[in-house]
Image (cartoon, rainbow, N blue to C red):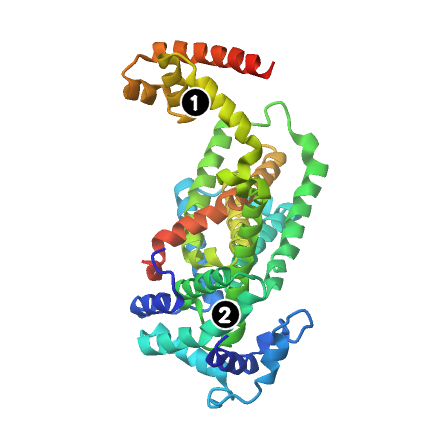
């Protein structure tokens, strides 16, 4: 992470009571040691009362002050990123979660009461969105299958050497078919066209294509059987 | 989404940052909803007329306790749902309507135990039941729409909790209206209606509340446009 980000992070860490609920110094976070080292941040003006400053910025943003809103969103982004980084490993996922939280804050910004502390409000929203994303991710993963090595090597011809002799035999057998049957097999089975498409391409009727395919499969079976004997 | 990069997103959000009107305190908003509920109740009562035997029924402690418990459940569930809709409020607010709810349910249960024998062969009249259904819809539909609109921003924050408490508030208010307006022949009818209404509305709220809330939030959130 860039030094600027770390500094801002350190600022906001000191500001919030909310961190009592989510202690960064827990042993399972490898970054906590690095973060606690940055104790002296160059910009100390916000450190004393950062939560209050964010609260004021939000109050001004609610009144339509765009500059205050920009400052607030930019200031809170590294902090949100740190919250998201506890639950997501991929940088893309972290950024998605941060953007989700920013959008939510934008949509519910009228629900913030400037008399109440800003930190717990922000942390509650961020956690809710992050948990929702985690749930969705888990649901998605339940329907996914990890790619195995077989899947990965499949398209590369060099990785399919084992199947090459059989393929060659099949190609040879197809070459030996009568022209009509050969065309039907190529269009329908090798190129995997639909009957309609194959009829358009070949200019033959669907019924003729069906008959040719049926005959071709029959002939291929006998040719290949003959070869293996 | 067309924006992929966080600084760009911030710029877009800043451009859309029109002034917003802050929400009033949750208690005041719950009060507004309850005032609306009272208005609906008065209108339905004017249209339909109070039940003829209300004075007699009022002297029955079981009826009175049950009705008041339903009213209290409605009021406290409304307060709870407005409180819980704020992201930084405590989850303990969920427990607020539990005591009157327990009392209400126990009066229903007690009534079932003592009065179930009283249904005679002519105990159930379909026309009265249909008028009950009309009252039920006239009360619960506007109240549900109002609370969904008022709490639409909670769709992104705590949809389930808000739907449960909001649904309970609507159900309790509707049951209160039913017991105030309809004289059903058998006491069991009121009890069944009470239970059925509560189960129906709470069930609908938990099934569709979340998606309804999201749907309404997408269309009526001023900042989302």
- Residue B142 screen position, x and y as percent: 41, 47
Residue B42 falls left or right of residue B114: left
Q: Are marks 1 and 2 in contact (CB under 8 Å)?
A: no
Q: B46 and B66: which one is in front?
A: B66
In the rendered image, which residue does mark 2 sit on?
A80
- Residue B197 screen position, x and y as percent: 55, 40
Task: Identify the image quadrant of the C terminus of chain A.
Answer: top right
Residue sitting at x 49%, y 47%? B209
Chain where mark 1 sits: A
Residues packed near mark 1 inside 10 Å, few (<14), some (14 to 19) or many (20 plus): few
Q: Is residue A183 above or below residue A91?
A: above
Residues packed near mark 2 inside 10 Å, few (<14), some (14 to 19) or many (20 plus): many
Q: Quadrant of residue A178?
A: top left
Q: A107 and B175: which one is in front?
A: A107
- Residue A95 screen position, x and y as percent: 46, 64
Q: Secondary structure at mark 2?
A: helix
Tag count in the figure? Answer: 2
Q: B131 and B91: which one is in front?
A: B91
In the rendered image, which residue does mark 1 sit on?
A189
Asked whether the viewer can see residue A148, the reply is no
Residue sitting at x 36%, y 14%? A179
Residue sitting at x 39%, y 42%? B47
- Residue B40 screen position, x and y as percent: 41, 49
Chain where mark 2 sits: A
Q: Secondary structure at mark 1?
A: helix
């Amino acid at each position: 992470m860039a030094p600027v980000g770390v500094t801002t992070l350190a600022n906001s860490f000191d500001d919030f009571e909310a961190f009592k609920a989510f202690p960064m110094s827990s042993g399972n976070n490898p970054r906590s040691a690095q973060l606690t080292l940055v104790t002296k941040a160059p910009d100390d003006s916000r450190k004393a009362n950062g939560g209050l400053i964010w609260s004021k910025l939000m109050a001004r943003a609610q009144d339509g002050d765009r500059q205050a809103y920009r400052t607030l969103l930019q200031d809170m982004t590294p902090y949100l990123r740190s919250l998201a980084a506890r639950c997501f490993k991929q940088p893309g996922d972290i950024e998605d979660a941060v953007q989700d939280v920013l959008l939510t804050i934008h949509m519910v910004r009228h629900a913030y009461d400037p008399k109440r502390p800003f930190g717990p409000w922000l942390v509650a929203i961020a956690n809710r969105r992050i948990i929702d994303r985690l749930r969705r991710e888990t649901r998605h993963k339940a329907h996914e299958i990890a790619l195995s090595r077989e899947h990965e090597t499949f398209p590369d011809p060099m990785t399919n050497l084992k199947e090459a002799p059989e393929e060659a035999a099949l190609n040879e057998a197809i070459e030996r078919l009568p022209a009509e049957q050969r065309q039907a097999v190529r269009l329908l089975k090798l190129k995997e066209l639909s009957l309609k498409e194959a009829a358009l391409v070949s200019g033959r009727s669907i019924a003729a294509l069906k008959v040719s395919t049926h005959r071709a499969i029959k002939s291929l079976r006998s040719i290949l059987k003959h070869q293996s004997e | 989404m067309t924006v992929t990069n966080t600084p760009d997103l911030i710029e877009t959000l800043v451009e859309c940052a029109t002034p917003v009107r802050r929400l009033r305190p949750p208690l005041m908003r719950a009060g507004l909803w309850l005032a609306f509920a009272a208005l609906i109740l008065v209108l339905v009562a004017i249209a339909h007329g109070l039940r003829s035997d209300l004075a007699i029924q009022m002297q029955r402690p079981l009826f009175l306790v049950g009705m008041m418990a339903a009213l209290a459940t409605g009021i406290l569930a409304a307060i709870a749902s407005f409180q819980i809709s704020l992201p930084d409020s405590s989850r303990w607010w969920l427990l607020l309507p539990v005591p009157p709810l327990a009392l209400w349910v126990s009066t229903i249960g007690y009534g079932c135990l003592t009065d179930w024998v009283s249904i005679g062969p002519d105990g159930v009249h379909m026309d009265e039941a249909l008028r009950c259904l009309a009252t039920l819809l006239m009360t619960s539909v506007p109240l549900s729409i109002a609370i969904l609109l008022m709490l639409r921003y909670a769709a992104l924050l705590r949809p389930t909790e808000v739907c449960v408490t909001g649904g309970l508030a609507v159900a309790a208010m509707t049951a209160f209206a039913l017991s105030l307006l309809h004289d059903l022949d058998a006491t069991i009818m009121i009890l069944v209606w009470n239970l059925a209404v509560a189960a129906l509305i709470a069930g609908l709220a938990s099934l569709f509340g979340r998606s309804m809330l999201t749907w309404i939030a997408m269309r009526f959130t001023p900042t989302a446009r």
